[in-house]
Structures are given as C-alpha cells and as structure tokens.
Image (cartoon, rainbow, N blue to C red):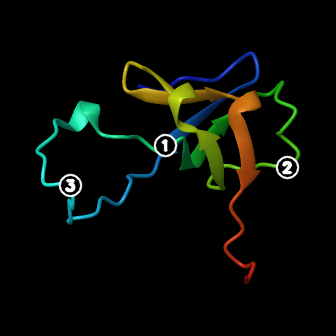
Amino acid sequence: MRIKPLNRHIVVEKEEEKQDKKDLSGFVVPEEFRAKDQYSVAKVLTISEDSKLLSNLSEGDRVVVETSMIFQIKGVQMILENYVYGLVDEKAHT
C-alpha cells in the first residue's frame, strides 16, 4: 500500500536495531519487556508537501526520530515532522 502523507507527516522506514547477542543479566525476558531505544534512525520515503522540513530533507535521507512516536497504518510507518530530531550525515567525521 502507498500512502501520500498530509498534515506535516513523513513516511519513514525504521532501520532495524542491532541486538547484542550477549545477555549478561542471566534472566530470560520476553521481547516486549526489553528496554527500547528512545531514538531510532529511519529512512525518509515520502514527505508531506506542507512539511517545514521539505527544504531540508529528501527522499532517501536518514534521520533521527523519537521511536515511540512512529506509528503504523496498514504496514506503512509514519511520523509527525515534530519528532524528527536530526539528519544523519554520513560524510561527517568525528
């Protein structure tokens, strides 16, 4: 399904989190009870035409978003532009 975002929303694809194979706690905990990262990296798929970020973002860019604010509609992940915190710059060196 393809959704055209409106009202300052952005269609994204959240990157899968790399999970550590080591569990040093010794406890077996169901997946839904494990701590989730507060922020995630997501790939921008489509940007609403009324988004303030339209001039700064392009389709294919990677952005830092608040994980809990990503919602899913019929298999499509979306987020409101307010919860996009930064653009991942692959060229920058630290």
Which residue is pictured at 74% across the width and 44% down the height?
Answer: 85
Q: Which residue is mark 3?
A: 25
How far apart, in angstroms, are the residues tagged by discs 3 and 1?
A: 31 Å
From mark 2 to mark 3, how far is it between C-alphas? 43 Å
In the displayed image of the protein, which residue is found farthest to the bottom? 93
Q: Amino acid at mark 1?
A: Glu
Gap in angstroms between the C-alphas marked 1 and 2: 18 Å
Whether residue 73 is situated above or below residue 70 in the rendered picture: above
How many numbered markers are drawn?
A: 3
Q: Which residue is mark 1?
A: 13
Task: Work out whether 78 lies above or below 44.
Answer: above
Task: Tell me: 2 left or right of 23.
Answer: right
Q: Earlier in the sequence, mark 3 or mark 1?
A: 1
The mark nearer the N terminus, 2 or 3, is 3
Which quarter shows the C terminus? bottom right
> Any mark on residue 36, and which?
none
